[in-house]
């Protein structure tokens, strides 16, 4: 049984026709009939150029954007059928890591405040418990951050360190699914490899299921078990990572492969 299953998922946006007097309305089919299954503990790489629908698909899975039709089934439960208050409760089970950690972190909150707030979403009784500090220390250690810096602010860290803080915040509510949306694209290659290795370690250590979104097939190849290639709102190719990399079937996949930088040497260092 799939841990996450997308069934004929559509997310459309109405757009008014051009012209001042136009009354026509067109539909942008950002996600157009996507069906996917992800096993527990699997990392699925979702690849495509900007505008292909990757981020809209992730927001629909997260229930931050309502689906036009179709189902998002997480661990046997259809999230699209839940009332809004129940979706908020379930959202602790699926968290996101964003491309720009500086923009996604509150600059007025220390690392301790950021992580303790996220921990207390799952464990509200810890708010006034001395054990909360131990939880923060443990979480920082898990992502490779020195706990001595827990009272520092985001601007006092490097880009790679800030992304580790963002990863720690995503892990704090103890999610079952993590969606990482271009989490290394703003980092230089050597730091990219460190973050990718961290994500692999966290998957093995915590049993996470992950959707890793990128426009770069070489990055996804290093990390993912399976790859889904998205174009114009649809999945145009899906397969095991190495098989897809060496034997692409779709012309769009071949186009992406022809443009990739090579990450293997940096990732191995």
Image: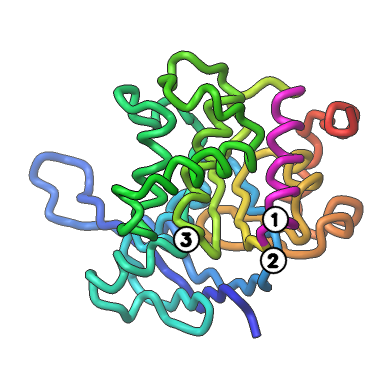
Viewer-proximal residue, 141 or 57? 141
Q: Is residue 151 above or below residue 94?
A: above
Residue beneath disc 2? 41
Q: Quadrant of residue 226?
A: bottom right
Q: In the rendered structure, are the residues bearing label 2 and label 1 in contact, judged by CB atoms less than 8 Å apart?
A: yes
Element at label 3: strand
Q: Position of residue 77 (x, y in %)?
A: 45, 82
The answer to which quarter of the image holds residue 153 is top left
Label 2 sits on a secondary structure element that is loop
> Label 3 vs label 2: CA separation?
13 Å
Cα–Cα gap, marks 2 and 1 = 7 Å
Secondary structure beneath dot 1 equals helix
* Numbered tag placed on residue 203 in the rendering: 1
Query: Dot 3 corresponds to which residue?
Result: 94
Residue at x-position 22% and y-position 42%: 18
Residue 136 is covered by the magenta coloring: no
Label total for image: 3
């Amino acid at each position: 049984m799939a841990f996450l299953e997308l069934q004929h998922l559509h997310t459309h946006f109405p757009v008014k026709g051009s012209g001042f007097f136009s009354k026509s309305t067109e539909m942008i089919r950002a996600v157009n009939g996507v069906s996917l299954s992800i096993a527990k503990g699997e990392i699925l790489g979702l690849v495509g150029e900007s505008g292909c629908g990757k981020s809209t698909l992730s927001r629909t899975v997260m229930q931050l954007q309502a689906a036009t039709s179709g189902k998002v089934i997480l661990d046997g439960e259809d999230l699209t059928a839940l009332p809004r208050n129940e979706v908020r409760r379930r959202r602790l089970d699926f968290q996101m890591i964003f491309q720009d950690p500086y923009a996604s972190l509150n600059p007025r909150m220390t690392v301790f405040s950021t992580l303790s707030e996220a921990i207390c979403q799952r464990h509200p009784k810890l708010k006034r418990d001395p054990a909360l500090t131990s939880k923060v220390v443990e979480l920082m250690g898990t992502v490779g951050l020195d706990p001595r810096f827990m009272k520092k602010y985001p601007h006092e860290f490097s880009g790679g360190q800030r992304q580790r803080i963002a990863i720690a915040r995503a892990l704090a509510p103890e999610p079952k699914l993590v969606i990482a949306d271009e989490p290394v694209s703003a980092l230089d290659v050597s730091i990219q490899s460190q973050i990718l290795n961290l994500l692999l370690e966290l998957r093995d250590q915590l049993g996470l299921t992950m959707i890793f979104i990128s426009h770069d097939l070489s990055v996804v190849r290093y990390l993912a078990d399976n790859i889904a290639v998205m174009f114009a709102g649809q999945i145009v190719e899906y397969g095991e990572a190495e098989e897809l990399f060496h034997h692409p079937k779709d012309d769009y996949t071949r186009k992406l492969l022809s443009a990739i930088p090579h990450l293997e040497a940096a990732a191995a260092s």
